[in-house]
């Protein structure tokens, strides 16, 4: 079985006010007022760090915690959009020089919008599942970094900077990955006149169907899922999903929404990280990571909390 043995998150402490994004011409007055109404005030960003430096900040933490981990890493999966790293960067060489080790295989997963990180974990899981040598590890990294103000607005939300890293192993040490599902429904690819997604009914049916398939595959009932960690789209979206699934909205944990705002492709694992720090998930309980977003793409993972 494949397990998540480590989850590491970096979210900057530096803030820029939402009004600063407005003044830079990145969003309209209408969008500014809408986001203010939804609770947005500040955007967390690190203007002094490049995307590569944020990635190394997390890799350094893993290396300093246990240098033997890197010697067992065979796969590195990068799950973020263009602009994070220079196109001509030789990441293999840089990692070899920085950590005195060589990661043989590096994959890149792109263009699955908010579910890209979940798909990256899916790729790493499949690589480890067919790996013959026990004790092999994979690292999955997702990062969001915006260089200019215009990049921060994705048509719906203004995003900050952040980076998240998972270490997976094929020896069942850590939280066990029970299943991973991603799905795309082209009927949901619609935009309103202001450029924001049109959340029609097919969007909700797609995510609920994907979640239901994950539950069937793992032979679990919805009542056996202790907590659900979604991405930070509006509460109304997840309230609609909760109604369709007939589960309490209180099962959805989005603590990072109020703390950090929208961090596309990372916020569901940041919500999970915050819950882990507070020991909110009890041993031998199941929990779910879910994402819904642009392009009609949804993602769902079910994991089982194991003894630390």
Image: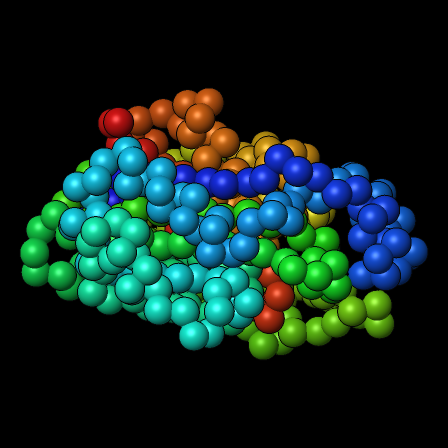
Determine whether, in the image, residue 8 is placed left or right of residue 260.
left
Determine whether, in the image, residue 92 is placed left or right of residue 57.
left
Q: Nearer the viewer, residue 114 or 209?
A: 114
The residue at 67%/52% (across/down) is 159
Task: Tell me how many marks there are.
Answer: 0
Q: In which quarter of the image is the C terminus?
A: top left
Is any atom of residue 210 visible in this view?
no
The residue at 46%/22% (across/down) is 278
Q: Where is residue 253 in the image (x, y as percent from the top left)?
A: 55, 35
Q: Position of residue 120 (x, y in %)?
A: 38, 61
**Residue situated furthest front in the rendering:** 97
Determine whether, in the image, residue 298 is placed left or right of residue 40.
left
Q: Is residue 245 above or below residue 281?
A: below
> Colour scheme of this structure image?
rainbow
Q: Nearer the viewer, residue 62 or 189?
A: 62
The residue at 25%/45% (across/down) is 3
**Residue situated furthest left in the rendering:** 133
Q: Nearer the viewer, residue 179 or 80?
A: 80
The residue at 35%/54% (across/down) is 140
Q: Where is residue 254 in the image (x, y as percent from the top left)?
A: 59, 38
**Residue situated furthest right in the rendering:** 29
Q: In this view, does 158 lie above or below 69?
A: below
Is any atom of residue 258 visible in this view?
yes
């Amino acid at each position: 079985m494949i397990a998540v043995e480590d989850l590491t998150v970096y979210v900057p402490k530096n803030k820029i006010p939402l009004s600063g994004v407005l003044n830079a011409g990145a969003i309209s007055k209408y969008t500014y007022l809408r986001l203010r109404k939804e609770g947005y005030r500040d955007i967390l960003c690190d203007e002094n760090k490049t995307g590569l430096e944020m990635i190394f900040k997390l890799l350094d933490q893993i290396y300093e915690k246990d240098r033997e981990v890197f010697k067992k890493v065979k796969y590195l999966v990068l799950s973020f959009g263009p602009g994070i790293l220079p196109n001509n960067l030789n990441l293999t060489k840089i990692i070899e020089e920085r950590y005195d080790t060589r990661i043989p295989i590096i994959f890149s997963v792109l263009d699955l919008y908010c579910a890209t990180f979940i798909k990256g974990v899916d790729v790493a899981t499949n690589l480890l599942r067919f790996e013959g040598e026990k004790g092999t590890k994979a690292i999955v990294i997702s990062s969001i970094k915006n260089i200019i103000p215009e990049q921060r607005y994705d048509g719906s939300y203004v995003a900050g900077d952040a980076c998240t890293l998972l270490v997976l192993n094929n020896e069942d040490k850590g939280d066990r990955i029970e299943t991973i599902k991603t799905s795309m429904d082209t009927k949901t690819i619609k935009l309103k006149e202001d450029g924001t997604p049109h959340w029609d009914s097919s969007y909700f049916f797609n995510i609920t169907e994907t979640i239901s398939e994950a539950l069937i595959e793992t032979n679990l009932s919805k009542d056996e899922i202790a907590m659900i960690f979604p991405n930070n789209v509006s509460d109304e979206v997840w309230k609609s999903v909760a109604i369709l699934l007939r589960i309490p909205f209180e099962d959805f944990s989005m603590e990072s929404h109020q703390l950090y705002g929208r961090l596309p492709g990372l916020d569901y694992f940041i919500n999970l990280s915050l819950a882990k720090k507070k020991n909110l998930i009890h041993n031998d309980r199941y929990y779910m990571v879910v994402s819904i977003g642009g392009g009609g793409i949804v993602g769902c993972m079910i994991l089982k909390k194991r003894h630390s």
